[in-house]
């Protein structure tokens, strides 16, 4: 009898794993169940879909029928996994097609993350739902709901709680739709993953330029609603902001509710996977936003809820289940985004993180250019490079630049992943063209700065 694999969760990582299993071994029976109405969806482009900059095809890649007909994968949407019996290897499922036990030989958990929602006075209506105009953006369904609401309400004033990547991207998207935006952030500064205050100031100045107001070291004391819809928010400093749209975007945490209903609580509340993405439960794997994996610099568990990480894990896990000798070694926290005219990207550890983890670290700041300065409008990017003092091993880097931020950071990411030093990076023969690069790119500039050459 052929092995039967069940995947719970049809997001990008889960569907990548399912597809890769069938590609490597078509004889394996693969089923995917998802409690929502969509599979094979991407969360990262949703702010741009809401703004009307990309179409639905950028966030929904394929439908269940495609996977059934073209890939031989049984996909069931609107099917909720209530509980898992790990001893008997069965899932209790509720749905139209399956309503009862679903057996498996091997199980892949890909249930993702859930938004962190603080306790705020006035958040909920009497029926326990949010008041009209209050949203989170975690799932593709959230994006559809938000876009429909914005199209109908013609909102003018938006408040975003949280100044992380999604908060920043949504601020730009809502501004693009003609709204006045306020961002409320409880920390005294934005984007702590960046390397220095000069980088952060560049982003903050850009927000101000585009009429986005930052309220730092502030929280929301109360949400005020009129006729069931949000109308104002009262801040901890006494400020009263107009709001006909409110987005809660202060972060996510792994969704372990299915495991908890099944009687399993991971140690310290963290589902930590090994290189083979095993959970410690026999024949149960996990991936994506619900798991912690190893940080390649610190060697410690690290939470990386990024779409590209989930996709890569899915690709490797599919091969592992099909019998290939593959492993997922870990991550280094690489991430990138863009806010108005600036791009930003990070990898590895910043200086404070490196010191906190016990590294004898140092840092240097250099300028970057994606083309020579003679081209009109070219502004140098700001680069921060962190390295180990005695060995000059690269530990991390961050950049805020007009263009090519992710491409520059990717060079440092390779160095961080493989433990390369600044001297070794200098030996790389980088390409040069006046219109697309410069002689002294950030890697080479860091070498000259550190070694005073």
Image: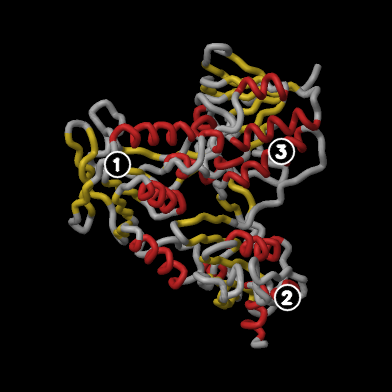
Which one is nearer the viewer's eye here, 44 or 281? Answer: 44
Can residue 206 be seen in the rendering of this structure?
yes
Mark 3 or mark 2, which has the lower sequence index?
3
- Check disc 2 and report its element: helix, strand or loop: helix
Disc 3 versus disc 1: distance between alpha carbons? 40 Å
Residue at 41% over, 47% down: 173
Q: In the shown orientation, is residue 320 left or right of residue 407?
A: right
Q: Residues within 10 Å of mark 1 (few under 14, many from 20)?
A: many
User: Quadrant where the N terminus lies?
Assistant: top right
Query: Pointer 1: what residue?
Result: 245
Residue at 55% over, 46% down: 305
* Mark 3 in CB contact with mark 1 (< 8 angstroms): no
Q: How is the image coloured?
A: secondary structure
- Check disc 3 and report its element: helix, strand or loop: helix
Q: Residues within 10 Å of mark 2 (few under 14, many from 20)?
A: some
Which of the labelled discs sits on residue 426, or is there none?
Answer: 2
Tell me where residue 65 sits by quadrant.
top right
């Amino acid at each position: 009898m052929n092995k039967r694999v069940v995947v719970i969760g049809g997001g990008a990582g889960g569907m990548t794993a399912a597809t890769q299993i069938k590609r490597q071994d078509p004889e394996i029976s693969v089923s995917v169940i998802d409690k929502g109405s969509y599979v094979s969806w991407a969360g990262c482009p949703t702010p741009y879909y809401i703004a009307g900059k990309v179409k639905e095809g950028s966030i929904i890649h394929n439908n269940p029928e495609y996977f059934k007909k073209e890939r031989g994968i049984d996909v069931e949407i609107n099917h909720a996994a209530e509980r898992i019996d790990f001893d008997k290897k069965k899932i209790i499922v509720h749905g139209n097609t399956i309503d009862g036990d679903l057996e498996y030989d091997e199980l892949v958990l890909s249930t993702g993350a859930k938004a962190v929602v603080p306790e705020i006075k006035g958040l909920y209506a009497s029926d326990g739902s949010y008041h009209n105009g209050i949203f989170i953006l975690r799932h593709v369904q959230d994006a559809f709901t938000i876009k429909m609401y914005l199209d109908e309400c013609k909102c003018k004033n938006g408040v975003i709680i949280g100044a992380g990547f999604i908060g920043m991207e949504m601020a730009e998207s809502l501004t693009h739709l003609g709204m006045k935006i306020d961002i409320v952030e409880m920390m005294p500064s934005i984007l702590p993953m960046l390397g220095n205050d000069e980088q952060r100031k560049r982003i903050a100045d850009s927000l101000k330029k585009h009429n986005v107001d930052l309220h730092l070291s502030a929280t929301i004391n109360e949400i005020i609603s009129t006729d069931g819809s949000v109308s104002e928010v009262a801040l901890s400093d006494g400020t009263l902001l107009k709001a006909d749209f409110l987005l809660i975007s202060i972060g996510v945490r792994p969704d372990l509710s299915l495991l908890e209903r099944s009687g399993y609580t991971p140690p310290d509340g963290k589902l930590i996977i090994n290189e083979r993405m095993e959970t410690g439960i026999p024949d149960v794997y996990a991936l994506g936003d619900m798991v912690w994996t190893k940080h390649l610099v610190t060697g410690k568990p690290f939470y990386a809820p990024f779409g590209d990480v989930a996709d890569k894990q899915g690709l490797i896990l599919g091969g592992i289940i099909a019998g290939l000798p593959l492993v997922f070694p870990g991550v280094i926290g690489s991430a990138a985004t863009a806010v108005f005219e600036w791009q930003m990207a990070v990898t590895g550890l910043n200086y404070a993180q490196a010191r906190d983890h016990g590294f004898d670290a140092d840092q240097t700041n250099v300028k970057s250019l994606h083309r020579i300065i003679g081209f009109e409008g070219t502004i140098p990017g700001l680069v921060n490079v962190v390295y180990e003092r005695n060995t000059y091993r690269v530990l991390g880097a961050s950049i805020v630049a007009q263009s090519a931020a992710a491409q520059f950071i990717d060079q440092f990411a390779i160095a961080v992943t493989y433990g390369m030093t600044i001297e070794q990076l200098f030996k790389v023969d980088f390409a040069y063209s006046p219109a697309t690069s410069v002689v002294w790119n950030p890697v080479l500039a860091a070498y000259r700065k550190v070694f005073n050459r």
